[in-house]
């Protein structure tokens, strides 16, 4: 037998021995079980109680099937609850699996009353496409309330013809029109553009401020940043009024308004009041009749005689 054949037989034998050893080792190792997981809804951050959930508050996470709580919201399951826009019943830490029992859905009876924090009220204000931020404000947002007044009938100064001021700061939007949940992306624009009212969460005092402001002029909503120091709605329950801010007048904004001449009526009124002669007083001395002006002329001014006081009427007995 040639050396080449011997080497070939040895090589084939070595390969067979290696395969047999590998199979034996694999059979001796315990098999690793395959863990089944499902993608479920979880909290994306630490969420406080009473929060109206937004897209940024929710996430999907793969969780082992055996550790899933009952009623977990599994991705792709038909008819599962939509948590966006729902009210969180209790605090939830980041990564907590959320179920339908953890929230109050917008379709539940009394949802709007449940969203109100203790001692708070819901008040609605009229808006249009401009004053309502073109329909971009949605439930759960925080806004300031601006009052703009026409002062033409209250002042003669062009500088004070129009005034704008922030009357309420940092109030939560509960509903836009009749929608008390955040609409889906597809129909958000159409839904909000049809809204003519916005419902805000305020204290009783601020509710009175809003009602009076609605009578004084036009109300506009100013959307606040989502990046706040706290997301706890109970920490922001004061709904402060903006009494410390000075109003902005027309003259503060427009140089043309400041350069307008003062109304002529005001100038004529001022000059007319300065030219009006003092009223004369009729003075009787027995059968003689005169006035205060002639008396001053006769007596030489302030040092003359002064008319004696008239006698009083006799008392009736």
Image (cartoon, rainbow, N blue to C red):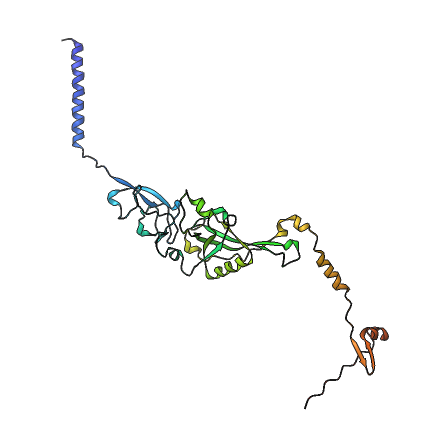
Residue at figure coordinates x 16%, y 18% from the top left = 13
Residue 8 can be seen, yes or no: yes
Q: Quadrant of residue 56?
A: top left
Q: Tell me where residue 300 appears, x and y as whole percent.
A: 85, 73
Residue 211 lies left or right of residue 90; in this view the side is: right
Most extreme residue toward the bottom is 317
Residue at figure coordinates x 83%, y 74% from the top left = 294
Q: Tell me where residue 241 appears, x and y as whole percent.
A: 51, 57
Q: Tell me where residue 188 appears, x and y as whole percent.
A: 43, 45
Between residue 234 and residue 127, name the one nearer to us.
127
Q: Quadrant of residue 317?
A: bottom right
Residue at figure coordinates x 62%, y 49% from the top left = 253
Most extreme residue toward the left is 1
Residue at figure coordinates x 41%, y 56% from the top left = 234
Between residue 91 and residue 305, name the one nearer to us.
305
Residue 227 can be seen, yes or no: no
Most extreme residue toward the top is 2
- Split into 4 quadrants, where in the image is the N terminus? top left
Q: How many marks?
A: 0
Q: Tell me where residue 207 appears, x and y as whole percent.
A: 48, 60
Residue 311 lies left or right of residue 130; in this view the side is: right
């Amino acid at each position: 037998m040639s050396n080449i054949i011997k080497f070939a037989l040895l090589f084939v034998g070595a390969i067979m021995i290696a395969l047999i050893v590998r199979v034996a080792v694999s059979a001796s190792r315990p098999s690793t079980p395959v863990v089944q997981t499902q993608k479920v809804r979880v909290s994306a951050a630490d969420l406080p109680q009473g929060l109206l959930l937004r897209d940024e508050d929710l996430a999907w996470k793969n969780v082992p099937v055996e550790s899933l709580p009952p009623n977990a919201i599994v991705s792709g399951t038909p008819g599962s609850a939509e948590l966006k826009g729902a009210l969180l019943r209790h605090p939830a830490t980041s990564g907590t699996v959320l179920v339908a029992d953890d929230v109050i859905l917008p379709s539940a009876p009394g949802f709007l009353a449940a969203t109100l924090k203790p001692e708070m009220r819901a008040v609605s204000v009229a808006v249009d496409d401009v004053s309502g931020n073109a329909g971009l404000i949605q439930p759960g947002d925080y806004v300031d309330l601006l009052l703009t007044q026409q002062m033409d009938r209250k002042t003669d100064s062009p500088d004070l013809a129009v005034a704008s001021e922030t009357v309420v700061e940092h109030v939560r939007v509960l509903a836009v029109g009749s929608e008390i949940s955040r609409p889906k992306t597809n129909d958000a624009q159409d839904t909000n553009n049809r809204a003519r009212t916005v419902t805000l969460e305020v204290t009783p005092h601020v509710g009175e401020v809003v009602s009076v402001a609605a009578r004084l002029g036009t109300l506009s909503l100013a959307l606040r940043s989502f990046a706040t120091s706290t997301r706890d709605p109970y920490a922001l329950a004061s709904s402060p009024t903006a009494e410390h801010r000075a109003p902005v007048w027309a003259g503060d904004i427009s140089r043309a308004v400041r350069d307008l001449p003062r109304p002529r009526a005001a100038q004529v009124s001022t000059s007319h009041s300065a030219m009006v002669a003092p009223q004369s007083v009729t003075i009787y001395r027995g059968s003689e009749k005169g006035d205060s002006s002639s008396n001053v002329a006769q007596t030489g001014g302030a040092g003359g005689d002064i008319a004696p006081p008239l006698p009083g009427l006799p008392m009736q007995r």
